[in-house]
Amino acid sequence: MRGRGELPKARSILIMHNFHAQTTHEFKEYLALAWYGPSECTDEVQPVDAGAGRFLKVEVGRQMDIIWLEQSDNLERWETASLTASDRRVLIT
């Protein structure tokens, strides 16, 4: 059993999209072999995005529209791109 913070002894493959945080040098230091799939095909290689994941994304978006974007200053921040991508991810989780 590995201790906390200990890296695995064998390499593994990790299939993901080209999200910036997953392409940094720090991310690449771990023992996983990263395979970056082509853009715009996540639903083809990650079926959860087309099924249960899609349902969850739609429901989260609906709740966000109802609760968070009802406030005019929040809607303005969303539409004027004054929210960073990181801020947006926090809001939908």
Image (tube, rainbow, N blue to C red):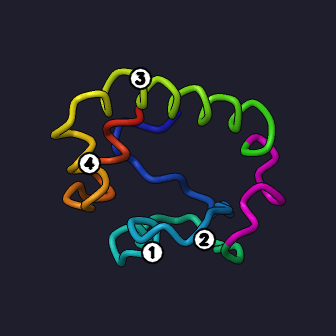
In this view, the mark in front (3 or 2): 3
Q: Earlier in the sequence, mark 3 or mark 4?
A: 3
| Residue kind at label 1, given as amino acid type | Thr
- Residue type marked 2: Ala
Report how far apart the C-alphas of labels 1 and 4 lie in the structure: 20 Å
Mark 1 element type:
helix
Residue that appears at 20% across and 36% down = 72
Q: Residue at x 27, y 61 (%)?
A: 81
Residues at marks 1 and 2, CA–CA distance in whole angstroms:
9 Å
Magenta residues (range): 40-48
Whether tag 1 and tag 3 are in contact, CB under 8 A, the answer is: no
Residue 66 position within the rendered picture, expressed as x and y whole percent measured from the top left: 41, 23
Q: Residue type at mark 3: give it.
A: Ile
In the figure, 9 relative to 37: above or below? Answer: above
Q: Nearer the viewer, mark 3 or mark 4?
A: 3
Residue occupied by mark 2: 34
The relative height of residue 70 versus residue 20 in the rendered view (above or below) is above
